[in-house]
Amino acid sequence: MTSTSAPTPHTRAPRPWSLAILRHLVHAEARKLPCSPAWWVLLILVVGCAALNPSHIGDVETPETTLQVVLAGWSTTVAAMYGAICITSEYRHRSIATSHLIAANRPALILAKMVFAALVGAAYALIAATTSLIAMALHGLHIGSELPQILGVIAVGIPVVALFGILGVGFGALVGKQLPAVLLSPYSLWLLQFLFQFVVDHFKLLSLSDAETYLPIVTMVYTITESTGGPQIDGSFAIGPPWWLEPLLLTSYVVLIAAAGIARAQRRDIK
């Protein structure tokens, strides 16, 4: 008589792109945060720059313009640097192999780092805006009448800075080396802009003056400045691009760099 064993129930392997796995990976990134001094060093940098900014920029006349400089300048720089450190520190300390073994796959790990870097970048932006408002109040600038414009700049500036956190991770994954990635990640849009200008000029797709609206750095500046009307209502009678075009282009440029970083991380040999 032959005995038949009971059939084992079919167990489905976890999906590598499920939200549950992504949430666990983002939580793992959060637990790594206290292990490195990078986050608080960059926090001191962004707070210091935001606090000193109103007293060192002589041509700033309104709180709105001051916030635009703080968010589009210092905050985006710090967010991109943190994003680059977030990924390149794994390569530097050779812990990336362990991270890849724990994660479902490499793109999921890089995506989780991008999500966490975006959250940290948004936090930096909020802290920088708050610090700047306090510093402006201490310097005697009255913000009561410009509160709607200030809230508009902050509402748009926070997601822009978050995008630069994603950009830093993508650029860091693309470069791999920590020092060049950290130093160049805030200027990766400038590098992309030079490439964009070269292609436009070489293939005569558009004149450089017509292509100005589509340049990566211009899209970032317009996205923040047009949160309060930009050149369309400031009395200069300039015709600005549609309000939705610049954020869409900026997001597209960041996604392009992020996708290139994910593709490079997928093919990189881990030693």
Image: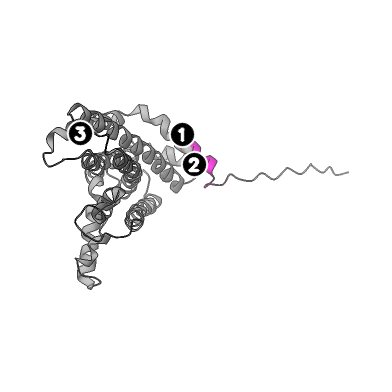
Q: Of the two numbered discs 2 and 3 on the same chain, state the one appearing first in sequence.
A: 2
Give the residue at x 33% y 56%. Answer: 243
Q: Nearer the viewer, mark 1 or mark 3?
A: 3
Would you name the residue on which mark 3 appears?
A: 49
Mark 2 vs mark 3, CA separation in Å: 34 Å
Determine if the magenta segment contains residue 23: yes
Determine if the magenta segment contains residue 176: no
Would you name the residue on which mark 1 appears?
A: 27
Give the residue at x 84% y 42%. Answer: 3
Residue type marked 3:
Cys
The 10 Å Cα crowd at callout 3, few under 14, some 14 to 19, many 20 or more, is some
Q: Residue furthest left?
A: 58
Mark 2 element type: helix
User: Percent x, y for residue 109?
Assistant: 44, 43
Q: Which residues are magenta?
A: 15-24
Q: Nearer the viewer, mark 2 or mark 3?
A: 3
Q: Main secondary structure of the magenta part?
A: helix
Q: Is residue 77 above or below residue 214?
A: above
Would you name the residue on which mark 2 appears?
A: 22
Left or right of 132 on screen, residue 109? right
Quadrant (top left, top right, bottom left, bottom right) of the C terminus:
top left
Residue type marked 1:
His
User: Percent x, y for residue 180?
Assistant: 22, 44
Residue type marked 2:
Leu
